Amino acid sequence: MRLLDWLIPILTIIGLYWFSSSFFLAKRSLPHSSSCDEAHSLLTEVLKLEPSEISSILGEDYDDATGSLRNGCWLPRKVDSVVILVVDAMRFDFSQYSLPKSIGSRIAKRQTTSSQLLQFVADPPTVTMQRLKGLTTGSLPTFADISGNMGGSTMDEDSWVQQLKNTDFKHRGLKYPSKLGFVGDDTWVDLFPVLFDESYPFPSFNTRDLDTVDNGCLKELPNLMKHVRRKNSHSPQDLELVISHFLGVDHVGHTYGPFNEHMDAKYRQMDEALSTTLDLLDEEDQEEEEGSKSCHLALIFGDHGMTNDGNHGGGTDEEINAALFVHFSKGCHLDDKDRTMPLEKAAEIMGSTYVQDKFQSMNQIDLVPTISILLGLPIPYQNLGGIVPSLLASHDVRETAAALALNAAQVWRYFTIYSQTANRLPNLPELEEQLKDAVSTYREALRHNEDGKDSNAFYTACGLFKLFLVEASELGHRVWTRFDTVGMAGGGLILAFVVLATLLPLLLLSKSFLAAQKQQIRNSRGLLENILTLIYVVFHCGMLSFSNSYIEAEQRIVMFMMTTLGGVIFVRLNSTVAGGNARILPYVPSVIGGVIFVRLNSTVAG
């Protein structure tokens, strides 16, 4: 009997460890950041290109002294400023019809290079904290990352927002250091507490509050827009990045669902605000002289969608299919058909399927390398996204090919370093062969382009680089975001055996023992224990498992429940009589199971 008392807890620990290690997929964060002077080394050491080929790619603007271009790090900067307008939980299908003034009017005739609406596919879990991490780092969140970051934490991975502040402004052809402005959901400030020069965060926890955050955005956003950086900026206070994060749509969904008059009213409010902001960027171009017009990029997107009952967090189509509207101001000259890559050709390079009215689809992490190149920044070190050619504001397929080549080199460097220092990734030889094919085609295109004219080889190279990036992203998803079902099944079988071994003796106990147990429950102490246990289970199963709005307060909720559980265990320990610790050992599986249960529920909640 004493041997069984020890065997059950040991098997429980083994089963729980095996199941947890298979469920909480872990990814080690590397303490590296990309630097502005790495373009040459990536092309030389990773892609194995010759000096003459590298010179053809980087051009005359490459500065040997700094290791970067004179108006950008890896490639020339394309835009003067970026305005990001996040409409939390904006589904793709809603963006087409619920925003007629801001988005609908700009794509009513046809999609153009300067104004595009794309399906913006999020990676589960579809919660704001994890989506913002993916949108700024290009990495994939894992379930271990979620459980370790309840309630928010400072970003510790390389991101394009951090690069915007850390990169020497002179290397990007700027007169003054970059300034960043923000208003809206305070999750951004949790992630980047010291990066924003002008910051107006508003608390996001109260999902019943439909207007406080949005009203704050409407109040402060016009003031931020007055200081957006222009092409010939002469003020050190000008903002290169402006972010406004509206929360009303998400809160209406949580409170009333997506199909009601409250949601209609909220989308009308958003439509007016977005349209006003876009008009400000376009009107500014009209006031400037032709040769000095600024190139502004406006990005309007949802960080995730929502289900038909207004929740989010999982991986259904309604939750992962958000919307992205991209608008370049007229100063970017992207409506000039003679100077711009055709949108159809860029979409062909993209290699994506067409969805819903033939709108192009892209993964959210693909925005990271794209926006980095547009701002003349290095791509974040741990990025797994692939550049979207149609969003590059490129007038030359050679520029697109160079951007994709650097993107591919950055991803391959990350995979090789991760395999050497953390865990060996599978299928790397096959992926390396794809990269070699793309590089070979690219080198062939460079050799046949000495006369300065484009060739079909560049388009082919772009397609091959994009294919490599898609396969690399798929590898990352397989390794870091998909469960080890074999390990989960093995751990589950061991736990099932433990439960059976624990319950079987109880079924064979005498009636006198069961009567004694009933008498103990009648005791006030036993009754208190059972009430607390019931509240514990009902709260976690009935509330947190079916609600997605508690992520900001999750840590306090879980800590309160863990404290309560600890109190119950303390009472149980002090009530032990003869028999010593052996009387306690049968309760160990329940205690450990309770702890894991809390962690599992805290993962899916939010």
Image (cartoon, grey):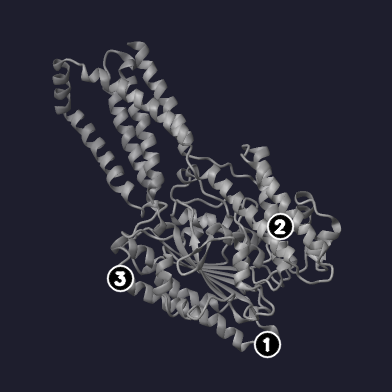
Q: Is residue 501 left or right of residue 429?
A: left
Q: Is residue 412 left or right of residue 18?
A: right
Please, what is the three-letter code of the amino acid marked with disc 1? Glu
Residue found 74% across the figure and 70% down from its top: 173
- Determine whether 452 is above or below 143 in the image: below
Q: In 3D space, how far apart are the residues under numbered discs 1 and 3 (Cα atoms)?
A: 44 Å
Where residue 237 sits in the image (x, y, percent)?
A: 62, 74
Q: Could you tell me which quadrant the N terminus lies in?
A: top left
Where residue 53 sits in the image (x, y, percent)?
A: 82, 59
Q: Is residue 46 left or right of residue 319?
A: right
Label located before the other in sequence (1 or 2): 1
- Determine whether 162 is above or below 110 in the image: above
Residue 12 tag number: none
Residue found 50% across the figure and 40% down from its top: 25
Is there a contact, CB below 8 Å, between mark 1 and mark 3? no
| Residue hosting label 3 | 262
Tag in front: 1 or 2? 2
| Residue hosting label 1 | 290
For the question of whether residue 75 can be seen, the reply is no
**Which SS class for mark 1?**
helix
Where residue 466 sits in the image (x, y, percent)?
A: 64, 57
Please, what is the three-letter code of the amino acid marked with disc 3? His
For the question of whether residue 437 can be seen, the reply is yes
Where residue 69 sits in the image (x, y, percent)?
A: 77, 65
- Judging depth in this view, the residue of 382 and 49 nearest the camera is 49
* Pointer 3 local density, CA inside 10 Å: few below 14, some 14–19, many at least 20: some
Residue found 47% across the figure and 81% down from its top: 105
**Which SS class for mark 2?**
helix
| Residue 520 position by quadrant | top left
| Residue hosting label 2 | 406
- Determine whether 73 is above or below 29 in the image: below
Q: In 3D space, how far apart are the residues under numbered discs 1 and 2 (Cα atoms)?
A: 33 Å
